[in-house]
Amino acid sequence: MQKPIKSNQLADIIGKLTLTKQAENVLSIDVRKVSSSADYFIICSAETGIQVSAIANAVRKGTPSKPWHVEGLNNQNWVLLDYVDVVLHIFKTQTREFYSLEKLWADAPTVEITDEPEKHSQALSN
């Protein structure tokens, strides 16, 4: 039997997987103290619908468990992969700018996820 993965570990795995398909502006928002809906929101963006789909597929194939719920794969503007404790939002860049979802959670600790070792998981000032 597989050992359950902690939500912070899953958030890190998901964040890194988004980068394998060149996701942009990848943020991990720790919403444990401000929401009961999840522990972490991962938010990223892509320039095209094809890239949005590629990111979603890379995450779905690379995570140790299947998402509980998936939305938006057909329209490719905003795809949501819900892993219960971690929710991934993949936006087309213009759609992300319009909704500014990260501003809704401005009180929560936010970390930028990059593929640069010295910058990986840098805390952002709120």
Image (cartoon, rainbow, N blue to C red):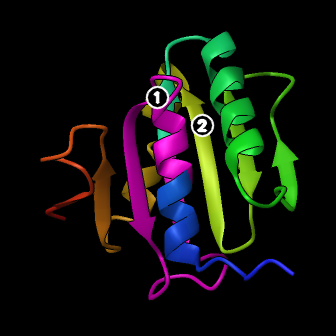
* Residue 72 in the figure: left or right of residue 46: right
Residue at 54% x, 41% y is: 17
Instruction: Say which residue appears at 44% left-offset and 88% top-offset.
Output: 33
**Is the residue marked by circle 2 packed among few (<14), some (14-19), or many (20+) residues within 10 Å?**
many
Confirm whether residue 98 shows in the render. no
Specify the amino acid type for callout 2.
Ile
Q: Which circle, 1 or 2, is nearer the viewer?
A: 1
Q: Provide the residue span drawn in magenta.
A: 14-43
* Total residue callouts: 2
Secondary structure beneath label 2 = strand
Quadrant in which the C terminus is drawn: bottom left
Instruction: Give the Cα distance between marks 1 and 2.
Output: 8 Å
Classify 24 as above or below 124: above
Up-down relation of residue 8 to residue 83 (above or below): below
Q: Is residue 60 magenta?
A: no
Q: Judge whether residue 19 is colored magenta.
A: yes
Q: Which residue is mark 1?
A: 23
Give the side of residue 27 with respect to residue 4, left or right: left
Residue under numbered circle 2:
90
Would you say 46 lies left or right of 113 here? right
Could you say where residue 91 lies in the image, as x and y percent from the top left? 57, 32
Type of the residue with mark 1: Ala
**Residue 2: quarter of image:** bottom right
Decide which of tag 1 and tag 2 comes sooner along the chain. 1
Q: Quadrant of residue 109?
A: bottom left
Judge from the rendering whether residue 103 lies leftward or rightward of residue 54; answer left or right.
Answer: left
Which residue is at a point 76% across and 43% down the rendered structure image? 60
